[in-house]
Amino acid sequence: MEFTASSANLLKIKADCLILMTNAQIGGALKAHNSELYGELKGLAKTVGFDGKSGSSKTLYTPGLPFPQIILIGVDGTTTRQKRIKAIADAATKAIASNAKKILWVADEISEDSNWQAAMVARNLLYASYKYVKNDKVQPSLLKTLVYWTPSRNVQRAAAAGLDFGAAVGAGMNCARELGNLPANICTPNYLADQARSMASDNSMLECSILNESDMQKLGMGSLLSVAAGTVEPAQFIVMDYRGGAKSEAPIVLIGKAVTFDSGGISLKPGGGMDEMKFDMCGGASVFGVMQALNSCQLSINVVGLVPAVENMPSGTATRPGDVVTSMSGQTIEVLNTDAEGRLILCDAITYSERFKPRAVIDIATLTGACVMALGKQASGLLSNDQALAEALLTSGTHSGDRAWQLPLWEEYDAQLKSNFADMANIGGREAGTITAACFLARYAKNLPWAHIDIAGTAWLSGAQKGATGRPVPLLMDYLQQSANRSV
Ligand code: BES
Ligand code: MN
Ligand code: ZN
């Protein structure tokens, strides 16, 4: 897909479809640009009863104009960022459904920040164009070109940069969605390792290396390996290194949980809905998505992506409840529940991250069902040992519309992890499950500015819309863009 910004005479731009986001007045920018076109559109909008209210939309057929179809999208009442994003997402869905090959987009005064707004348009168009190819009848979306119209040269420049960034984020989300949606018999730890290798070979700024089980053994990753003990799929520890910043600059490390299937192990999950545990690698998938997005918009920043990839299965060789394992940090863990496996792979990855002397470590994981209960599908859970980092991530969540909400990491909760047979248990009882999971991880992040994002509720949708969402790629990319700006 090609995204360009233009401030040319609107009537000189040919397109299959014009998307016009506006109120009932057919706003000011268009009026100033071409009063005749404005008058004509205003008249047409009136005849079809377009009221401009947020959520309303009308299609006009205008064979006399260079754009034979116009979709009016109401934006009255889109007062918050979240509502503006919703309006743009709905418009993008309609734009894709129109089957246009070329779209002209006029977002009339819904936001003063044209860089942000253009980024949202590009991102949401890509998001709406994604389809999982379940058979050979699925046709890819027809959209090839977006022309994003702005009223002046200055605004055009800001919008062009926004389009670039938004397109990178949208493609990154779709990369994460595709990996998430693939079934667990295809998307194995090995498959993910191959994806990393091929991404690195296509991109000069990205390198990757893969640790196999014997490498992990040598490093002492006994906790991670205990999760893979019951499966025939060998664990893979994927290291991706994006070098966009100065050599001397400390990297940001992203760690993504990639349990390619979480059966629960010997602490077997109930059968209903267990298929959705193929999505238990969405944290890892979001790290792949970010790496892909970084490659395409070339942010000036160093980012290391760590993806511990395992399958959690029951068998005669699987880890038992009550087994004690030793993590890479030397701390021992009593595995009271083999279904609390995410933290067992993440703790070794966090210890491994110390070697990069990072300026921040962020782990992303479908970690707890409790997080879905607490925050639902709206917000990811955020916990951190560094309040400045937490606040930067919360701000990026709001700015990108990919929101997170902070929960406390108090030591009183940590006490729930006490074990009589090891340094800690891997579960903390029924209460505050999201917090005790994070308290477990915090024991491995004592020397690091660290944040944990629990995406159990946000990484995928269930029911008729079942599928991966690509979250929190937008939050992470916003944070990385802000961080790249801060480092120069
Ligand atoms: N992958 C699950 C968490 C999960 C469950 C995410 C449902 C999304 C939907 C994780 O490995 C898990 O099983 N967690 C347990 C922890 C418990 C045993 C302490 C949970 O949340 O039930
Ligand atoms: Mn589990
Ligand atoms: Zn899991």
Image (cartoon, rainbow, N blue to C red):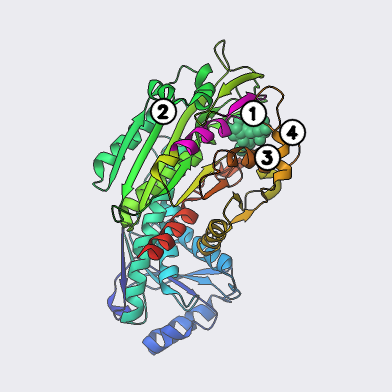
Mark 1 and mark 2 lie on one chain; the one further toward the N terminus is: 2
* Residue 436: assigned label: 3
- Identify the residue shown where x is 53% and y is 22%: 226
Mark 2 and mark 3 lie on one chain; the one further toward the N terminus is: 2
Across and down, in percent, residue 210 comes to 35, 31
Look at the image and give the residue range highlighted in magenta: 331-352
- The CA span between labels 2 and 3 is 26 Å
- The answer to whether mark 3 is within 8 Å of ligand 1 is yes
Residue at the spot of label 4: 429
Query: Which quarter of the rendered image does ligand 3 occupy?
Result: top right
Mark 4 and mark 2 lie on one chain; the one further toward the N terminus is: 2
- Residue type, mark 4 in image: Gly
Magenta stretch containing residue 334, yes or no? yes
Mark 4 and mark 1 lie on one chain; the one further toward the N terminus is: 1
Residue at the spot of label 2: 236
- The CA span between labels 4 and 1 is 16 Å
- Residue type, mark 3 in image: Thr
Q: Is mark 4 on a helix, strand or loop?
A: loop
Magenta stretch containing residue 488, yes or no? no
Q: Is mark 2 on a helix, strand or loop?
A: strand
